[in-house]
């Protein structure tokens, strides 16, 4: 890889640096709040049911509004959408911290506030994915996405540790107050991005429903995207959710409890960091094949939990699991940004998000009852088998192989004595052959 395409070289782009600061700050807040909010609700009510309702309120808007967020992100300025949603979430979390610290909080207040925060995330995330190609040129998109994946993983590690310290030494409200400040930092960073980053897009004058319908119609013309959405949804339903629901039970029954599962969680996060580094340097000619194939790295973790294996074997298995999630997400984001027209990126992202968001609640809800009926070991063994079957089935589909990486066209400067060609067709090649192969 040439030096100008290295991951750190992307940070030399001023607008991308501002984008990274904004998204990392938002990601820190997103990882900080769930931990603090869980303890806040338990201190307030002591009720698992109340905690479930509050957690649901953070997720439900993202499920219901994901496609709407994609349409809005494709029709309006993505910079403005991100700014507005950051300000809204800053106000919401500041209000949440205030009612907790002053002792006036009620469960219904927390639910209403987190519904608004969840709605903000539903609009922020598709716009954020769509803005990346405006601040980074296409040849460096994979390095940019890799750096963002690493920053999110690092922010998550720091956020969980910070939340634990704040909850232990002070109160959950202070942790949520810090979350409000992270959204303010994000808004200030994004405000420095040029207003001209996002040009007007086709269909802007159409209504919201018409925009949703036309956008989904265009997205349907890319079979690989729907195959990828189906794979992501199925593996979240059948593999990822059961592992993270049943893993703590295995650790508690056979491995000594929370410290064992914490070790697996840490190794998973470290693996995600390593995966970001690997994805920044690995260029595959078939990125969808590589990403889907890498998902098989989750199988050792499911098998190790089914046995169950000792912690010293679970830790490297967790590392492989984290490695695949970064590679999978980086390759997926880069494919969408490189191979779809700008006015479809947010809607395509929302389709992929929706599949995962809908699958996770069903997967987590079903894992416990199914394990109670069939046994935890049996279910985890079935999870490993399903991971292989779903992935191999996806790799067998022709659409998976049609996503091809096109090497960037290097334009050599013309000698000073030779005038540059005036015909736009001279020396220019279409960098997106995928549009022809998947239309």
Image: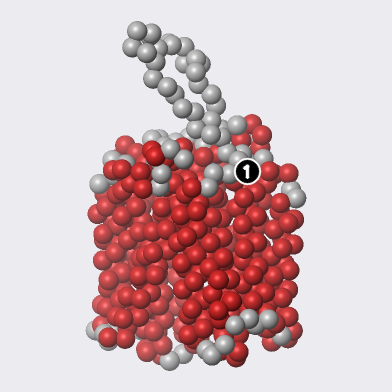
Badge 1 crowding class, 10 Å Cα cut-off, few under 14, some 14 to 19, many 20 or more, is some
In the rendered image, residue 255, in percent from the top left (x then y), is placed at 57, 88
Splitting the image into 4 quarters, where does residue 317 fall? bottom right
Residue 63 visible in the shown view: no
Residue found at x 65% / y 68%: 299
How many marks overall? 1
In the rendered image, residue 239, in percent from the top left (x then y), is placed at 64, 69
Vertical position of residue 316 compared to residue 1: above or below = below
Please name the colour scheme applied to the rendered image.
secondary structure
Compare residues 398 and 411 and report the one nearer the observer.
Answer: 411
Residue 38 visible in the shown view: yes
Q: Residue furthest front?
A: 312
179 sits left or right of 284 in the view:
left
Splitting the image into 4 quarters, where does residue 33 fall? bottom left
In the rendered image, residue 4, in percent from the top left (x then y), is placed at 38, 38
107 sits left or right of 385 in the view:
left
Residue found at x 51% / y 69%: 268
Vertical position of residue 422 compared to residue 48: above or below = above
In the rendered image, residue 390, in percent from the top left (x then y), is placed at 71, 60
Compare residues 251 and 119 and report the one nearer the observer.
Answer: 251
Work out which quarter of the rendered image holds the C terminus and state it.
top right
Residue found at x 46% / y 54%: 277
Vertical position of residue 131 compared to residue 167: above or below = above
Instruction: Provide the secondary structure element on which disc 1 rests.
Output: loop
Residue found at x 57% / y 39%: 405
Vertical position of residue 232 compared to residue 265: above or below = above
Q: Which residue lies under the disc numbered 1?
A: 286
């Amino acid at each position: 890889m040439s030096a100008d395409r290295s991951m750190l070289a992307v940070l030399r782009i001023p607008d991308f640096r501002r984008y990274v600061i904004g998204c990392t700050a938002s990601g820190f807040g997103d990882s900080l709040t769930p931990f603090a909010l869980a303890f806040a609700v338990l201190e307030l009510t002591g009720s698992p049911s109340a905690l479930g309702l509050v957690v649901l309120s953070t997720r439900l808007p993202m499920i219901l509004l994901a496609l709407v967020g994609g349409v809005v992100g494709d029709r309006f300025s993505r910079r403005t959408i991100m700014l507005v949603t950051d300000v809204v979430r800053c106000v919401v979390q500041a209000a949440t911290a205030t009612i907790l610290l002053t002792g006036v909080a009620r469960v219904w207040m927390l639910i209403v506030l987190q519904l608004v925060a969840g709605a903000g995330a539903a609009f922020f995330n598709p716009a954020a994915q769509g803005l990346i190609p405006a601040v980074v040129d296409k040849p460096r998109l994979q390095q940019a996405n890799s750096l963002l994946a690493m920053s999110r993983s690092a922010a998550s590690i720091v956020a969980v540790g910070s939340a634990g310290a704040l909850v232990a030494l002070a109160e959950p409200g202070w942790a949520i107050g810090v979350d409000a400040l992270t959204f303010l930092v994000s808004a200030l960073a994004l405000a420095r991005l040029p207003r001209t980053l996002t040009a007007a897009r086709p269909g802007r004058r159409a209504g919201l429903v018409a925009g949703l319908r036309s956008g989904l119609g265009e997205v349907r013309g890319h079979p690989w995207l729907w195959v990828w959405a189906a794979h992501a949804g199925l593996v979240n339903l059948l593999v990822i959710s059961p592992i993270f629901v049943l893993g703590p039970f295995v650790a508690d029954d056979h491995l000594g409890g929370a410290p064992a599962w914490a070790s697996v969680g840490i190794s998973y996060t470290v693996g995600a960091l390593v995966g970001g580094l690997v994805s920044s340097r690995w260029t595959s000619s078939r990125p969808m094949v590589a990403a889907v194939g890498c998902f098989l790295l989750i199988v050792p973790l499911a098998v190790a939990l089914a046995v169950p294996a000792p912690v010293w074997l679970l830790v490297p298995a967790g590392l492989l699991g984290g490695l695949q999630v970064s590679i999978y997400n980086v390759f997926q984001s880069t494919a969408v940004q490189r191979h779809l027209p700008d006015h479809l990126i947010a809607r395509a992202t929302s389709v992929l998000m929706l599949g995962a968001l809908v699958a996770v609640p069903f997967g987590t809800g079903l894992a416990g009852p199914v394990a109670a009926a069939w046994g935890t070991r049996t279910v985890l063994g079935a999870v490993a088998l399903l991971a292989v079957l779903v992935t191999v089935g996806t790799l067998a589909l022709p659409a998976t192989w049609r996503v091809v990486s096109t090497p960037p066209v290097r334009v050599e400067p013309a000698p000073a004595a030779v005038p540059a060609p005036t015909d736009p067709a001279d020396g220019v090649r279409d960098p997106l052959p995928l549009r022809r192969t998947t239309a």
